[in-house]
Structures are given as structure tokens and as C-alpha cells.
Image (tube, rainbow, N blue to C red):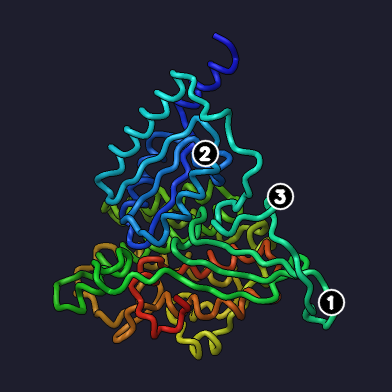
Amino acid sequence: MDMRARLLRATAARPHVLPVSTPGGTAARLAAERYLRLHDLPLALTPADADLLLVTGPDRSALRPAVDRLWQHLPAPRARAHAPTADAVPGALARCRADLADHTHNGDREGGGRDSGRGHEGHGGGMEMPAGLPMAGTGEDRDGLSLDQLHVSLGPLLADWPSGLTVRMTLQGDVVQEAEPSRQQLGDDGPAPLWAEPWARAAGGEPVTVEEAARRRAAAHLDSLGRLLAVAGWAGAAATARRLRDELLDGTPGAALRPEVRRFARRVGRSRTLYWLTRGMGVLDGERARAAGVSGPAARAGGDVPARYRTWLEDIVGDVDRLGETAPLDPAEEGPRGGGVGERWPSAALVRVLPELLEGAELAAARLIVASLDPDPDELAAAPQEVGIHG
């Protein structure tokens, strides 16, 4: 067996998976992340590194072109699967891996790999561009100088990104001059977003305990931290956050979780590297946050990216300490992204403040700022047009 054949067989045995999620697909995404972790399948961060493309969540016609663009940039041999629900994940991945093994066994290289003449949109899914880059124009920078302008987009499908959200930016150098967010609107015709579901049930008169809400909120914050830490390049801590998230959702008792949750919070909260990497980014003081309708951790943090992730950590520790409380949940109590009585889509306000936080920031900071707010894509998809996000 030659070296090429050995490499292909190794790929089929342990393929790199590029998972992307659609709005409304949080439960399916969580199931996929758990499956990949338990089966030790490596994640791909870009199409160029991927062997399998796994789409989780409902089929969204508006996102099909973006999914197809990702698929075009996976090198052969490759396979793709769609798991619309959590229960569909194992079967979809099994079929996908079988397809990849067949391609590998048959020596199907689909033309020998990626078409080198194709424009590279990357993971964001934008317009076709020569040499993989958009053309630059000119415009005045923030100091009145005339510099080249570059128009780029982040989203709607991107690793560790709110699915369905697109942020179009105008850059001069590596500084964001303008930022305009938009999102896919699906309408309020589906189930309550997973993370806010206990509050929706309580508001409807169903019995929900404080423990159930605390468990869901802590899991949501750990999910957000997993994305932020992954974007920051701290893969080990991101994996720990996601494992603790899954243990909370599995119903692991508070006494068993408490020691490791506290160790994790101390480790991340005291990390000098993470602090120095993110300090001063995306400053949002409490007064400005409340004026924009922002509530929850982002408003209480009243500061930069470190202030927000440390607030998440404090809330996680506090919620794990509340596991076991059987008192009924007050529907007005703050959910994972904030909210309260009469506020069903607190994530919409998180997107509304993005332009002022991104403008003037370096491009490298943009994804960290978005991850530190982490608007819920399920809430954004359900939010009506009048919430003030461009559709």
C-alpha cells in the first residue's frame, strides 16, 4: 500500500468534521458536539481542513447557498450530512462516514481536490472574489486620511459564531470603520429557544423549579464560554466548558459538579493570557447597555470582553450552588441573555449594540467581541422585524 492510500484510509477512519448549525438547531448542535467529543472525532475550523460537512438544525432555504459554498471548498474525498434534530445526529454521521469510506476505497478524488481557480469566501460565505480577496476602494479613515477600503462579511455560517447572523464591515487597514449586522428572520412560529425554554414555560403557567432554570442558565453560559475560548485559541478550556455544559444538561448533581466548576472558573477568570488578549475590547458600560435595551450579563458586566466573561463565570458558580432548590421559578427572573417580563428576545438588543462596539476595533478583535455577547441565534430567528435588526 502506497503512502497516499494509507493517508486516505487514515482520513476515513478519523475524519475531520466541519459542523455548522442553522437557527433553531441548538439542540441538534449540542448533540453533534457531544457525539464528536465522545467519539474523539477532530473538529475542522475551515473547509480546507475538513473531510465531512455536518449541518445540524432545520433546513433553512435562505442558508442553502452559504452551505453549498462551504461544501464546494472541502477538498476531496469528502462527504456531507444533515441532521435536522438531535436524534438524527448519530445516523447522519454514520451514513456520512460510510460515504467517505466508499470514496476513499474507490480512490474517488473528485478531480484531485479543490479547484484552485475558485474564489475563497472562507467560512463566512460571501461573494466570489479574485485571489480570495475583495477589491479595495478608497475612503477617508477616522482621522480624515484617504486610505484603501475593504468590504468583508462575517457569517452567516462560521465556526463558533451565531448562525444566521451576518456582519458586513468596511475596513481601512485592519480597523473596522463601519459595521452593519443583519440576520435571517424565520418568524415566531416554532418552539421556544432552547436556552430560554424554562422561562417561557413558567410564563405560560407551567411549574418550573429554580434548579431547572439555574441548570439551563449555567449550561448556556458554559456554551457561550466554549465559543469565546475557542475563538481565543484556548482549545483545552473550551473543551472543558462544553463537557461541563453537557454534564449540567444530563442532570449531574450539584455536589458532583461544584468542585470542578469552581476550579474552571478560577482558572479562566484568573488567566493573565486571556485577559491581556481581550482587555479593552468592545467596551459597553452599563448605562449605554441599558439605554440600548441590553439586559442580563452584558448589562451587569458594564465593561469590556473580560468583564463579560468574568460575569458569566460568576453566574455559573452561583447557579451551580442553586442546584437542588425546588422553589418555583419567577418568570421575571433573568434568563441566559437577560430579559424578563415582556422581553422575549433579549438577544436582539445584543446585536443592536454591535456596530458601536465593532467600529474602531481591529478586525482580529471583531470575533472576540461578538463571542463575548453571544446572541442566541434561535432568539434572533424568532424576533420580529420591529426589534430593530436589519432583516
Point out the image quarter for the C terminus.
bottom left
Residue 286: x and y in percent read 54, 85
Q: Is residue 178 left or right of residue 249?
A: right
What amino acid type is highlighted by mark number 3? Ala
Residue at figure coordinates x 44%, y 19% from the top left: 106
Q: Quadrant of residue 197?
A: bottom left
What amino acid type is highlighted by mark number 2? Ala
Q: Secondary structure at mark 1?
A: strand
Q: Is residue 152 visible?
A: yes
Residue 241: x and y in percent read 45, 53
What amino acid type is highlighted by mark number 1? Ser
Tell me, for residue 131, which label it has, or none.
Answer: 3
Tell me, for residue 50, which label it has, or none.
Answer: 2
Q: Nearer the viewer, residue 333 or 173?
A: 173
Which of discs 2 and 3 lies nearer the camera? The answer is 3
Q: Residues within 10 Å of mark 3 (few under 14, many from 20)?
A: few
Q: Nearer the viewer, residue 160 or 111?
A: 111
Q: Decide which of tag 2 and tag 3 comes sooner along the chain.
A: 2
Q: Residue furthest left?
A: 206
Q: Nearer the viewer, residue 302 or 288?
A: 288
Q: Is residue 344 left or right of residue 373?
A: left
Residue at figure coordinates x 68%, y 64% from the top left: 363
Q: Decide which of tag 1 and tag 2 comes sooner along the chain.
A: 2
Task: Please give the residue where the numbered disc 1 appears in the rendered image.
Answer: 146
Q: Residues within 10 Å of mark 2 (few under 14, many from 20)?
A: many
Residue 20: x and y in percent read 44, 51
Residue at figure coordinates x 67%, y 51% from the top left: 132
Point out the image quarter for the N terminus.
top right
Q: Quadrant of residue 21?
A: bottom left
Q: Secondary structure at mark 2?
A: loop
